[in-house]
Image (cartoon, rainbow, N blue to C red):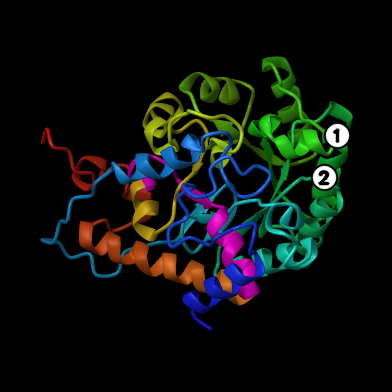
Amino acid sequence: MNLKEIRDKAREQTKGYCRVCPVCDGRICSGEVPGMGGTLTGSSFRNNLSALAAVKLNARLVHRVYYPKLETELLGFNLKLPLMVGPVGGVAFNLGGPISELQYQEAVALGAADAGIIAGTPDAVPIEVMRAGLEQAAKLGGGRILPFVKPWEPDKIAEKFDMCVEAGCRVVACDLDSIGLVTLRLMGSPAYPKDQSELTAIIKTAHDKGLAIIIKGVMTPDDAIKCVAAGADGILVSNHGGRVLDSVPGTAEVLPAVVKAIKGQAAIIVDGGIRTGVDILKMLALGAEAVMIGRPYSIVAVGGGRQGVALYTETLRAQLEQAMIMTGCPDVKEAFALKEELIFSAAS
């Protein structure tokens, strides 16, 4: 089975919910929330892709970079390339239920493990979605899964952190941007904003349970600084795939300012509009230490299961390696240091 066959199968299985476009750019599915689109006009979804497209790379060919190093380590995760599968829940709700939540979480978790990366697993309504992801975490020893917990009330957060510990997880994430999810409100379980003291309490709760924690939804330097001050081990620059607020910038556009504000103080991950290995290199050059991809993995998991996830990851790995060779980047960890050489600037 190849990626075209996998995508064709996914298109048939998700008919009426996702068109499986040649490039997942949010143009056709604008406003389809619930669904896979971006909220309202869908501009935030599209801005993620246009911001990345605006970043150009320099082709540098006078060098000896034959075999660039793609492996990296992040918060204790050993990754064969700086990539994670984004936490997608509600397959039945948003994609028409072509496979069960358990089948979906199994496909992304095991496919990611096969490819030497990790999968994020979601916290969703009903709780069986989170349990499905944590079941895979337990099977893989916990260290190959990054569970997400939404900003609920303190007791509920603590309870879910305990579930993560029980599954053997060492790192968790809290997606603050989920407070804007329409689907949670429709299901009667909205998440809530957190002020500085509440965020500090969430992070302390995680640390008290032996968990490192990443805060997702950071889109400004100010929020990044507040997360670091609250004790976050990492931040995830994300506008939730454009699903929570219309008319915000793409993540590649805001990433440099966030990096300038907190680089070296916490791990920096980014998602939003990343579709190829070239996109991964761009984000690394802008200062991210790893990237996360969501929607495209949903498609290959639905159409190809575990094999589809592993195959798509291998495609991204090959594209990233080629991009590094063509730009003279020897190591993913050096991409940011080589930013001036890697990213084309008309002014230069």
Q: Which mark is residue 125?
A: 2
Quarter location, residue 347: top left
C-alpha separation, residue under disc 1 versus residue under disc 2: 9 Å
The verdict on residue 193 being magenta is: no
Q: Give the magenta range.
A: 283-305
Residue 151 location, x and y as percent? 75, 31
Q: Are marks 1 and 2 in contact (CB under 8 Å)?
A: yes
Q: Residues within 10 Å of mark 1 (few under 14, many from 20)?
A: few
Mark sitting earlier along the chain (1/2) = 2
Kind of residue at disc 1: Gly
Q: Circle 1 is placed at which residue position?
A: 188
Q: Residues within 10 Å of mark 2 (few under 14, many from 20)?
A: some
Q: What residue appears at the point 10 percent right and 36 percent down from the top-left corner?
A: 348
State whether residue 163 is above or below residue 202: below
Residue 304 location, x and y as percent? 61, 75
Quarter location, residue 100: bottom right
The verdict on residue 287 being magenta is: yes
**Main SS class of the magenta portion in the image:** helix
| Residue 111 can be seen, yes or no | no
List the single residue furthest toward the bottom. 1
State whether residue 279 is above or below residue 219: below
Residue 211 location, x and y as percent? 73, 42
Q: Nearer the viewer, mark 1 or mark 2?
A: 1
